[in-house]
Image (cartoon, rainbow, N blue to C red):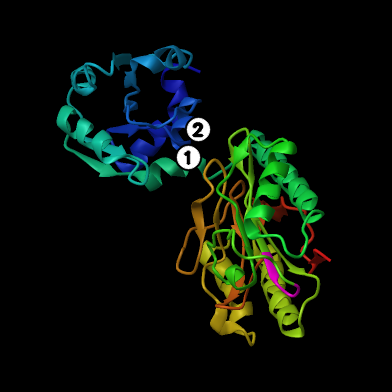
Amino acid sequence: MAGQDRFATLVDVMTAYGLDAVALVPGVNFRRIVGRDFHQNERPLAVVVTRDGRQAAVVPHLEMASFATLKLDGDVFDWRDESGYEAAFEAAGKSLGRLGRVGVEGQRMRVFDFLALQRNLDCDGIVDAHAAISSLRLHKSERELASLREAIRLSEAALESALQQVRIGQTETEIEAILVRELFAHGAEGLAFDPIVAAGANSAQPHAQARADYRVRAGDALLFDFGGRHDGMNADITRTFFIDHVSDTDRDFYNTVLAANETGRKTARAGITAGELDDAVQTVLEESSFAEFRRHKTGHGLGLDVHEAPQIMRGNEQALEPGMVFTIEPGLYRLGETGVRIEDDVVVRADGVEVLTRFPRELRIVGC
């Protein structure tokens, strides 16, 4: 798709948010809008789109052949390492002329990209429009959902294969290596993020890192938070198991999280707010005997980014709408002892949610 058609939804966002132009840099929004991603390195690459549909791009010379496949209608200004990028930004600014407010992705754009635009665009100001630009990804297409389902399918298959290889005495890093190997063996094109494999007391750290000096023991919790990527879409799954056996306290601990997860899956539907969903899930935890061990919200949006809108948290008045994808991942964490998190990926439908993750949630003993 060429010309303004390619950017029609972005133009709608600019109109709604009072922007005269948007400057995009490589990342998930760039991929969704332009149709291809580019690696971010020391060489800036930017595409500026105006509300009346004009485009200007600044592209490193070594990327010109790849960029040409996009067949954009606007002016492209390339630059070489030996001459630097300033002249290309200056030429792009002149080609665009006078602009009003220019929106950029505040969570993605680097400082030197921002400064180059600031020096060379004749505009009323550059503002953070990250939320507005990212809103284009709130509702997933059926094609994106098909890719996400495949990312989840291969991730769950990899997890089952990895579990069959878990043994008492292995280190967390050894188990992590097994999981990563199985992800690629089952067809992942990449990792959604660096996986979390945490046992024993380490499982009580929500964003733990695998240890090479700890060997899993009987009675340990073993938490996996991970995902594979397929066609750009990311799975994000958490399951918690126990090694060899589970204590009565840890069983109750686990079942409390499971009840909160089930409440989230049953409560989520179009029309309620993200805050109302979080409140329903958190209430289950708060009314349990383990209330003091809550540490985070219920979930986050998922897609081309692992963490995106909507944020499933109290105070978020955003209404859930069909096509939104997010996680439901309640957890409890007794620091120094045990952590449990159970995470599912769901998409909102008109009559509720479709749960995309299928891996069993019931308490499971492994590594016997």
Q: Secondary structure at mark 1?
A: helix
Please provide percent x and percent y for residue 192.
58, 44
Identified at 39% across, 47% down, the residue is 131
Q: Which residue is mark 2?
A: 32
Specify the principal SS of the magenta part: loop
Please provide percent x and percent y for residue 306.
54, 48
Q: Residues within 10 Å of mark 2 (few under 14, many from 20)?
A: some
Q: What residue range appears in magenta?
A: 218-222
**Residue farthest bottom in this picture:** 289
Q: Which residue is mark 1?
A: 136
Q: Secondary structure at mark 2?
A: helix
Identified at 24% across, 36% down, the residue is 112
Q: Nearer the viewer, residue 226 or 236?
A: 226
Q: Is residue 286 left or right of residue 167?
A: left
Question: CB of mark 1 within 8 Å of CB of mark 2?
Answer: yes
Identified at 61% across, 46% down, the residue is 323
The mark closer to the camera, 1 or 2, is: 2
